[in-house]
Every structure is written in structure tokens, then in C-alpha cells.
Amino acid sequence: MKFINTDKAPAAIGPYSQGIVLDNIVFTSGQIAINPESGNIEGTTIEEQTEQVMKNLKAILEEAGTDMTKAVKTTCFLADMNDFAKFNEIYGRYFTTKPARSCVAVKTLPKNVLCEVEVIASR
């Protein structure tokens, strides 16, 4: 196993890694809308927060030697399913190859953000 660590994505705020490479598969930890430069939540709308989440995932995948076109599965968590269409619009700009996906509404996310996304990708 290889542990992924990049300063272009938020540092882990708990006992976990940004991502792990196992053979030719990359597993990212769930990413929320933390700006890695400031450490603050980026944006107040679902669109703004989703955009930051995608930037964080992109950085982790690139550090692992892959990119978003190689995503095979994502899991998406929304604080409010009413945000689904707006979330999907931003998500679709980044995941153009249409990986398999689960998307669920949850009661609360870390730091009370509006969305969190994790990815499994090939290298």
C-alpha cells in the first residue's frame, strides 16, 4: 500500500489518509469543501462547496498518478437531497466518464458542510 499525501488538498483532520493506492486502484477518503491553502470551508452554496470538493479530489487523484477520467465508483453524501440537481451539475463537469455512483442524503456532515465525495479510481 502507498499512502497519498498532497498539500494541494486538505490535510486529514483525523486518523486517516487522503488516499491509498493498492496495486493499481486508488481509494480516496471523503473530501469536503476545505480550501487547502486557508483551512477554511470554501463557499456557502452547494455549487461553491461542490467545486472545492472536486478540486480536492482532483489533487489527490493526480498525486496518486491518475485522474478523474479513471474514476470507477464514487460515493456522494448530501446534507439536503434538494441540492441534488445543483450538485449534479458541478459533479458532471468533473466526472465526464460517468463512473458508477451512490448518492445519499445524510443528517450531518463534518463541519456542517453541504456535501462530501469519495472516489475509487484505476491507475
Image (cartoon, helix red, strand yellow):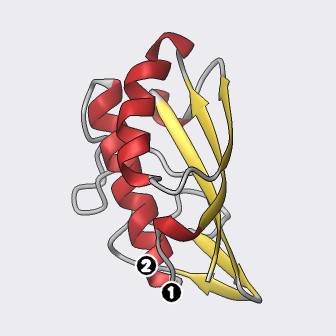
Name the residue furthest front.
97
- Badge 1 crowding class, 10 Å Cα cut-off, few under 14, some 14 to 19, many 20 or more, is some
Front residue of 41 and 69: 69
Location of the C terminus by quadrant is: bottom right
Residue at 49%, 80% (x, y): give it. 5
Q: Disc 1 marks which amino acid? A: Gly
- The location of residue 75, given as percent across then percent down, is 66, 44
Residue at which label 1 appears: 65
Label at residue 119: none
Front residue of 63 and 33: 63
Tag 1–tag 2 contact (CB < 8 Å): yes
- When the figure is inspected, residue 25 is found, relative to residue 57, above or below; the finding is below
- Secondary structure under tag 2 reads helix
- When the figure is inspected, residue 22 is found, relative to residue 31, above or below; the finding is below
Judge whether residue 113 can be spotted in this image.
no
Residue at 62%, 53% (x, y): give it. 99
Residue at which label 2 appears: 62
What is the count of numbered marks? 2
Name the residue furthest top.
82
- Secondary structure under tag 1 reads loop
Front residue of 116 and 103: 103
**Residue 6 sits in quarter:** bottom left
- The location of residue 18, given as percent across then percent down, is 56, 68
Judge whether residue 91 can be spotted in this image.
yes
